[in-house]
């Protein structure tokens, strides 16, 4: 038999790449084909995800890549020390299956998928060092497993209360220790000029997200919620200057769509605030069903979107230590993660978002095995009921097998919101 007729044996890594590419392209094609009035400027983001997750293209081959396991690791400091932050939260069912062999079956699918990703070593941009804040217990414990795959994982201490002055000082010290460790790894001293520039650049990126959010307050919403999740997830790994440029182009188009009254949804589509476990590409299962069911996500309270961009660093004095203290305060005080002993701030924010964006209801998703969101849901549901805001609680994992059951529940909730709206007239 000639060599030309011989079939090349597919390696496990190539097979995993192919399966992940299939997951990614299936979602991207569905978003591009299933919804009316697509936003042309979203092509940049569709292409970005295809390049990175289907073609395994590296974006940062010339930079030191600093992996982060949570948004509580300050990107401002990483950029100021000439690193590139790469958030490592993972949404692939393919990686979840690998992680299931390494973690308990009842573990959070996001954590299993993240560990599975490390186990395969199948990165387009492999992290040179990983910083893991001690926020989520499962992520904290998984750090030791990730280290066995040859990665340098460094914990960053994070308090479980944020109200006390002791917690504030504790985290300020923790951030300075993180800065020292990264500075030593980079063999570079943190300068006032670089840190100020980094804070300003990320602040500008956040301001662009705020401009985008204003369009979602309108009666006619020019962009789908699932597109916004793509935009914010792209910030996990994209070159920040490219992301900013793409956002500037998007905002110009949204302004034109707003003037032309182009609606991404139907006239009677219920407006949804999305909260709970974070939508991580390509696990947009619940957001996708919501918007396929004739509703539109107008706001969210998640760590993969709104929470990441909402609050900016407020600096009193532009000296290095003062800037570091301000960064620590922003990442602690503004955080509404349910890992804290109390979640009053988070409940207030959800209610505020529902009122600000004139939402008809809230959909709360918790990953099966994500203990903090599962435990918190009762207090959130009680608060929403007291505030007169309809809410649907959903527990799901990364498996595609639940689609029919989830669709039935979400469609019924959306129909109830339509009925409620009609009865108000």
Image (tube, grey):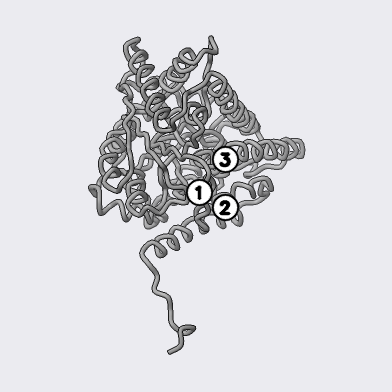
Left or right of 156: which side holds 37?
right
Coordinates of residue 289 in the picture (x, y in percent)? 49, 49
Per the model, the C-alpha gap separating discs 1 and 3 is 26 Å
Name the mark nearer the viewer: 1 or 2.
2
Q: Residue 281: percent from the left, percent from the top?
A: 47, 47
Q: Disc 1 vs disc 2: Cβ atoms closer than 8 Å?
A: yes
Residue 105 in view (yes/no): yes
Occupied quadrant, residue 72: top left
The residue lying toward the viewer, choosing from 191 and 367, is: 191
Mark nearest the camera among 1 and 3 is: 3
CA neighbours of label 3 inside 10 A, class few (<14), some (14 to 19), many (20+): some
Looking at this view, is 373 or 25 the one in front? 25
| Residue highlighted by disc 2 | 31
Q: Residue at x 28, y 38 (%)?
A: 138
- The reply to whether dot 3 and dot 2 touch (C-beta < 8 Å) is no
Q: Quadrant of the C terminus?
A: top right
C-alpha distance separating marks 1 and 2 = 8 Å
Comes first in the chain, label 1 or label 2: 2
Residue 53 in picture, x, y percent from top left: 49, 53
Mark 1 highlights which residue? 288
Q: Position of residue 277 (x, y in %)?
A: 39, 38
Q: Residue at 33%, 43% (x, y): give it.
A: 151
Tag 1 near tag 3, CB within 8 Å: no
- Determine whether the residue tagged by mark 1 lies in a helix, strand or loop: helix
Q: Which residue corresponds to mark 3?
A: 239
């Amino acid at each position: 038999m000639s060599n030309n007729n011989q079939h090349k044996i597919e390696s496990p890594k190539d097979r995993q790449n192919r399966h992940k590419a299939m997951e990614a392209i299936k979602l991207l094609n569905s978003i591009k084909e299933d919804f009316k009035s697509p936003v042309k400027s979203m092509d940049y983001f569709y292409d970005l995800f295809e390049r990175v997750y289907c073609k395994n293209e590296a974006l940062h081959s010339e930079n030191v890549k600093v992996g982060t396991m949570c948004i509580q690791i300050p990107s401002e400091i990483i950029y100021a020390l000439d690193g590139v932050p790469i958030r490592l939260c993972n949404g692939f069912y393919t990686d979840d299956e690998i992680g299931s062999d390494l973690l308990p079956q009842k573990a959070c699918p996001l954590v299993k998928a993240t560990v599975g990703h490390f186990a395969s070593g199948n990165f387009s941009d492999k992290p040179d060092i990983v910083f893991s804040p001690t926020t989520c217990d499962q992520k904290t414990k998984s750090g030791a497993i990730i280290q066995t795959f040859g990665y340098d994982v460094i914990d960053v201490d994070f308090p479980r209360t944020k109200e006390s002055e002791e917690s504030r000082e504790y985290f300020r010290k923790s951030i300075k220790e993180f800065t020292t460790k990264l500075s030593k790894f980079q063999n570079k001293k943190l300068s006032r000029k670089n840190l100020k520039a980094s804070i300003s650049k990320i602040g500008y990126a956040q301001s662009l997200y705020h401009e985008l959010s204003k369009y979602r307050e309108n009666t006619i919403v020019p962009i789908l919620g699932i597109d916004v999740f793509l935009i914010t997830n792209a910030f996990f790994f994209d070159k920040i200057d490219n992301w900013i440029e793409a956002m500037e182009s998007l905002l110009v188009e949204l302004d034109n769509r707003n003037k032309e009254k182009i609606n991404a949804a139907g006239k009677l589509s219920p407006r949804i605030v999305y909260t709970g476990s974070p939508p991580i590409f390509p696990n947009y299962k619940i957001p996708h069903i919501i918007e396929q069911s004739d509703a539109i996500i107008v706001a969210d309270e998640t760590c993969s979107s709104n929470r990441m961009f909402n609050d900016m660093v407020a600096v009193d004095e532009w000296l290095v230590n003062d800037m570091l203290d301000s960064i620590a305060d922003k990442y602690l005080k503004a955080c509404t993660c349910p890992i804290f002993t109390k979640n009053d701030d988070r409940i207030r924010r959800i209610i505020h978002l529902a009122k600000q964006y004139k939402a008809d209801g809230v959909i709360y998703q918790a990953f099966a095995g994500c203990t903090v969101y599962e435990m918190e849901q009762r207090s959130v549901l009680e608060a929403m009921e007291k505030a007169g805001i309809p809410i649907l609680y959903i527990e799901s994992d990364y498996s595609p097998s639940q689609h029919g059951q989830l669709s039935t529940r979400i469609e019924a909730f959306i129909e109830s919101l339509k009925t409620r709206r009609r009865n108000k007239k």
